């Protein structure tokens, strides 16, 4: 029997994309894409999500790419402009699950920037608990991050559904015994929940 849902946040409930900021800063889309691919790479952002201080992370990149110093600094000083809105369809699903299930979140997110999300998205209050990678110094798909959720909040993976938009995070959850759904869009999520026999209030 399913008792608990564990949600990822960015890409599932919250629309985050650095392009929302950098489209304002680059006139040439190709140059923007090159910057995102070669300077502010995903591995670098993952370090921030794992707890590496933003100031140090920015300084590291500026040392490597001094000609891009202003653009790199904006990743920190104008980070809030990378936040889009809520993914409304998923937020509605969350509301529908709340009356009958435990709701928890397991998110790769910097501890320094997560307060922006807390201030902006009221539905985050619907979660019993939110584990943020930057606060815990653990990051998906590290099994220890999932296991921290299990022990701290007494989560039984076999009674839980884990929802994430990243394949490697889904694979890690499955190996730990969670039921798991790879998120594509809210309509697909509703269909997958129906297949599991989950009814929404």
Image (tube, helix red, strand yellow):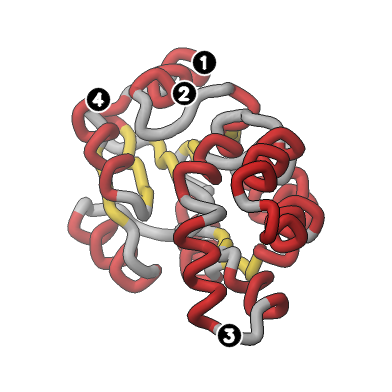
At mark 3, the secondary structure is loop
Q: CA distance from mark 3 to mark 2?
A: 43 Å
Mark 2 and mark 1 residues within 8 Å of each other at the beta carbon:
yes
Tell which tag, 3 or 4, sits nearer the viewer.
Answer: 3
Q: CA distance from mark 3 to mark 4?
A: 44 Å
Residue 64, position as x, y percentages in the image: 60, 45
Disc 4 target residue? 176
Q: CA distance from mark 3 to mark 1?
A: 47 Å
**Labelled disc at residue 83:** none
Residue 147, position as x, y percentages in the image: 39, 18
In percent of the image, x 18 and y 58: which residue is there? 195
**Labelled disc at residue 149:** 2
> Relative to the observer, which residue lies in front, 3 or 165?
165
* Disc with the residue nearer the chain's start (1 vs 4): 1
Residue 195 appears in the picture as rendered: yes
Q: For mark 2, does the 10 Å Cα neighbourhood hold few (<14), some (14 to 19), or many (20 or more) residues?
A: many
Please give left or right for residue 74 compared with residue 34 in the image.
right
* Disc with the residue nearer the chain's start (3 vs 2): 3
Please give left or right for residue 194 compared with residue 90 in the image.
left
Tell which tag, 3 or 2, sits nearer the viewer.
Answer: 3
Please give left or right for residue 174 compared with residue 129 in the image.
left
Q: CA distance from mark 4 to mark 2?
A: 12 Å
In this view, 145 is above or below 68: above
**Labelled disc at residue 152:** 1
**Labelled disc at residue 28:** 3
In percent of the image, x 33 and y 58: which residue is there? 183
């Amino acid at each position: 029997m399913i008792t608990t849902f564990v949600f990822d946040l960015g890409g599932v409930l919250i629309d985050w994309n650095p392009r929302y900021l950098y489209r304002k800063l680059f006139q040439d889309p190709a140059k923007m894409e090159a910057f995102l691919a070669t300077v502010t790479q995903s591995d670098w952002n993952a370090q921030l999500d794992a707890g590496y201080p933003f100031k140090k992370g920015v300084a590291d990149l500026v040392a490597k790419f001094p000609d891009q110093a202003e653009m790199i600094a904006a990743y920190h000083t104008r980070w809030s402009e990378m936040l889009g809105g809520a993914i409304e369809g998923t937020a509605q699903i969350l509301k529908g699950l709340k009356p009958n299930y435990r709701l928890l979140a397991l998110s790769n997110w910097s501890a320094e920037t997560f307060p922006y999300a807390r201030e902006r998205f009221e539905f985050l209050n619907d979660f019993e608990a939110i584990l943020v990678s930057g606060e815990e110094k653990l990051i998906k798909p590290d099994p220890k991050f999932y296991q921290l959720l299990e022990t701290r909040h007494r989560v039984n993976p076999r009674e839980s559904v884990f929802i994430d938009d990243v394949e490697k995070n889904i694979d890690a959850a499955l190996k730990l015994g969670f039921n798991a759904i790879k998120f594509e869009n809210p309509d697909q999520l509703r269909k997958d929940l129906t297949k599991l026999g989950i009814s929404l209030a």
